[in-house]
Image (spheres, helix red, strand yellow):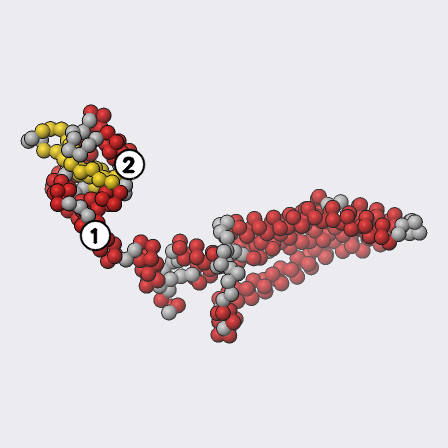
Amino acid sequence: MSANKTEKPTPKKLKDAAQKGKSFKSKDLVISCLIFLGCLYLTNYINFTTIIEIWANTLKNNHSITPLNYTFVLFFTALKIFLPFLFLCILIIMLTTMAQTGFKIATKVLKFDFNNLNPINGVKKIFSIRTIKDFIKTFLFIIIFFIVTYIYWNNNKKIIFSQIYLNIESVFIVWKELVSNFIIILLLSSFIILILDAVAEYFIHIKDLKMDKNEVKREYKEQEGNPEIKSKRKELHVEILSEQVKSDIESSKFMIANPTHIIIGIYLNPQIVAIPMVSVLETNQRALAARAYAEKEGVPVIENIVLARRIYNTHQLYSFINLEEIGEVIKILSWLQKVENEWDN
């Protein structure tokens, strides 16, 4: 069956998949953004000097500081430093994930799916395109890691070995710079792989959601309604119209709709009188029935919400069109006549 799935997923299919947590997202892209922005925050906005000073004071005054006081001060200092960092990490994960999923919430993701326990599905996942893609991606990441590590080591080994001459605070600062720079360089070197992985993940995601033609037809019927049922509805609508209304619709030049609640029929016979008049005036279900009958009989239906409401509020059935509305009605009549003439030619 999967070979017959050649149709792109419909908006409804994508929406249903998103509710089940199957929306497009690149996890590696999320993690990379988290590490990159986290490193920038740690190196630029967190001051580790406070913790170093606490340790130094403890070593100098180890007889006067109790273990409880030391633990209390260290805990709240670390909390003050790392709590904003924790909130930043949560915010980064939320924003990067929601930016990829289109801010759609997976409402059905917590429902248990017994298909996940099927061993056949497990074997299929092992030999799937996504597994091959992940293997290639991991292999490329390992190569980049070793290349970046080798180059970074050669460029910074003198700084690393020279730290035996530095004090504790300086060593801490140097290592902070070395580690953060290494992570940032590694991420930047992997940027192309991350983008290619995201693109590949998107196409695999769309491929997994592809539909066959029967699925598309079935979904269309569910959303728009079965054509046979819609035809039957039109027949039922027509039945609620009297013979007089049907006759008035047939003799009308055109109908003005609003588009489902109001319908106005316009009649004009220049041989009797040159002023158009209201031949049909129906609302709600009868308006739908009148529209269906007009379409069936080939009477033009023009959707004009403002004009339909205005005529409905200011006119009665079989009354002549007022001067305020006659200009717009004549324009529509002229346009219909022009279209009819071009069609005949």
Of residues 196 and 107, the one drawn nearer to the viewer in this rendering = 107
Q: Residue at the spot x=26%, y=43% of the render?
A: 284
Residue carrying label 2: 305
Residue carrying label 1: 236
Q: Is residue 164 left or right of residue 6?
A: right
Q: Residue at the spot x=59%, y=65% of the render?
A: 139
Of residues 337 and 310, the one drawn nearer to the viewer in this rendering = 310
Q: Residue at the spot x=72%, y=57% of the render?
A: 153
Q: Whole-Å distance between the Cαs marked 2 and 1?
A: 25 Å
Q: Earlier in the sequence, mark 2 or mark 1?
A: 1
- Residue furthest to the top in view is 323
| SS for callout 2 | helix
The quarter of the rendered structure image containing the N terminus is bottom left
Q: Is the residue marked by circle 2 packed among few (<14), some (14-19), or many (20+) residues within 10 Å? A: some
Whether residues under marks 2 and 1 lie with C-beta atoms below 8 angstroms apart, the answer is no
Q: Is residue 61 left or right of residue 29?
A: right
| SS for callout 1 | helix
Residue 27: x %, y % from top left: 56, 57
- Residue furthest to the right in view is 63
Of residues 30 and 240, the one drawn nearer to the viewer in this rendering = 240
